[in-house]
Amino acid sequence: MDRYDSLLSRLLWWATVLIVFCFLVGPFVIMVAASFQETRTYFTGPWDWLPTEPTWLNYEILFSRSSVIRWTLNSVIVSVIPVIGSIAFSVLLGYIFAKKKFPGREVIFWMFLASIMIPFQVTLAPLYLMMNAIGWIDTYWVLIVPHLLNVTGIFLMRQFIQSIPESLEEAAIIDGCTPWQVVRHVIMPLSKTAVATLGTLGFITAWNNFLYPLIFTASESMRPLTVGLATFADTTSSFGINMAAATINFLPTFVIFLAFQRHFVKGIALGGMKL
């Protein structure tokens, strides 16, 4: 009886895994497969997305008729630079809030944290007026500078750095290290997991950002990939071309996540233990 119960449990387990896999991964499989299907306006059957004669035509049309290379370059710029700056500020401020004692430290930190509760849509209009007043609309500055400070990143680094023994910091100071050298030679090497987690989350968020660059950019040459492909999709009725555009936008974040997934999962687990 126990043998049949065990077999039934395993069957139910694998059936559940298969169903969840189909719901989570299935749309991406259809997206990639449909991008190799011949160009057509719509599909007449449930399996028309499956290419019988795979072709690169959709990608050729996409690269020849749009500025996808320029959009990709813009996405790289507005994703990599803010993430690097955000990590630097997060590590420094996280170290200060975790290890340094000064009047009002907790009040300032919780004021930072409280700002997360303010919806982005509330600050969107005032931010646009501010950026327009200083002439940053439709420039790289407006896409980079406001994202250099990440409150969530500061919180994550503070929680992680608090777990680093103070004896390591004290030993470095005794050896003659300045605070900057302590951060560089002690805190940073021990925080690689948290930094990888912060970098992965930041890159994926910045790469997939749509509303912000849609509002703050006007010219085609300044659009990132998400906005550029969305506007290009409005000019074509081809389902295959749209799926090719979606695949191009999806692949970089997928590769980044695969490369850092081990650090990402470990960082989330360590961060959760400190909450």
Image (cartoon, grey):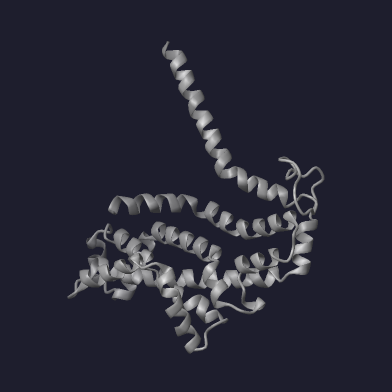
Q: Is residue 208 visible?
A: yes
Residue 238 placement (x, y as % from top left): 75, 57
Residue 161 placement (x, y as % from top left): 30, 61
Residue 85 placement (x, y as % from top left): 45, 73
Residue 224 as seen in the image, left or right of residue 108: right
Kindly give the residue lying farthest to the top in the view shown.
Answer: 1
Quadrant of image for the N terminus: top left
Kindly give the residue lying farthest to the right in the view shown.
Answer: 53
Quadrant of image for the C terminus: bottom left
Figure check: 156 above or below 266: below
Q: Is residue 154 visible?
A: no
Seen from the viewer's position, the closer of residues 33 and 257 is 33
Residue at image point 44% right, 69% down: 121
Residue at image point 44% right, 53% down: 263
Residue 274 as seen in the image, left or right of residue 230: left
Figure check: 81 above or below 14: below
Residue at image point 80% right, 51% down: 38
Residue 124 placement (x, y as % from top left): 45, 74
Residue 150 as seen in the image, left or right of residue 37: left
Seen from the viewer's position, the closer of residues 213 and 265 is 213
Kindly give the residue lying farthest to the left in the view shown.
Answer: 103
Count of numbered tags: 0
The picture quadrant where one finds residue 234 is bottom right
